[in-house]
Image (cartoon, rainbow, N blue to C red):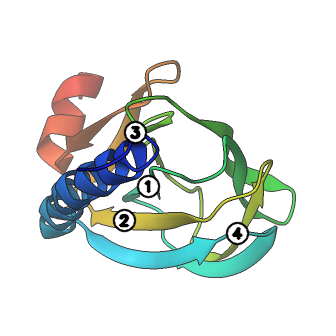
Amino acid sequence: MHSTSEEPGLLAKIASVTIVPIIICAIFIALDNGECIFAEYISNESEFQVNLSKNTKYELWVVDLIGPEKINISVRKDSYVAYEDTFMLMHPEGDYLPYHPDFTVKENGTYKVHIKPQDPGTVKIGILEYPSKNGGIIKEKSEQKKEVKLLTPSKLKEELGI
């Protein structure tokens, strides 16, 4: 018979065995639609360089159940900031909010991804790429919601009334 001090550890092991495969499946489903261009485990303040292209939607993933409570992340090129936010770990869900936000960049080039955990822990950071199709233009529909709409040249003319 197990003592009560062993039960929380046993429950944590059962939860991790159940939850980890679900997270891995979710990541593979997401990777099926987009291409992972950056993935790193982070535990200390770090900076990486990634090549990004305009007319491409990027999605930022922060994944871990026991990572830092808060993480500051920015994507910038010189003084231009393409994305910047503080991610917060939600309990007991284990998700970070904002949840997989997307962003675009104004020009092609090398961007610095700066990651600063505010608390101890290790977290996986990833950037997925979703290139535009058929020569379409990715258009931000709403700055507040950051919805992305893909327009072909004919649809763009139609929307502009040309």
Front disc: 3 or 2:
3
Give yes or no for contact between labels 2 and 1 (Cβ–Cβ under 8 Å).
Answer: yes
Amino acid type, residue under disc 2 in the picture? Leu
Disc assigned to residue 30: none
* Contact (Cβ within 8 Å) of mark 1 with mark 3: no
Q: Residues within 10 Å of mark 3 (few under 14, many from 20)?
A: few
Instruction: Identify the disc placed on residue 61.
Output: 1
- Give the residue number, with chain letter if any, for mark 4: 43
Instruction: Find numbered disc 2 in the image and state the secondary structure of the residue it sits on.
Output: strand
The picture places residue 68, in percent across and down from the top left corner, at 66, 50
- State the residue at coordinates (13%, 43%): 154
The disc, 4 or 2, on the residue closer to the chain's N-terminal end is: 4
Near-viewer residue (52 or 31):
31
The residues tagged by marks 3 and 4 sit, at their Cα atoms, a distance apart of 32 Å
> What's the residue at 23%, 25% (across, down)?
159
Q: What's under tag 3, amino acid-wise?
A: Thr
Q: Which residue is mark 3?
A: 4
User: Gap in Å between the C-alphas at discs 4 and 2?
Assistant: 21 Å
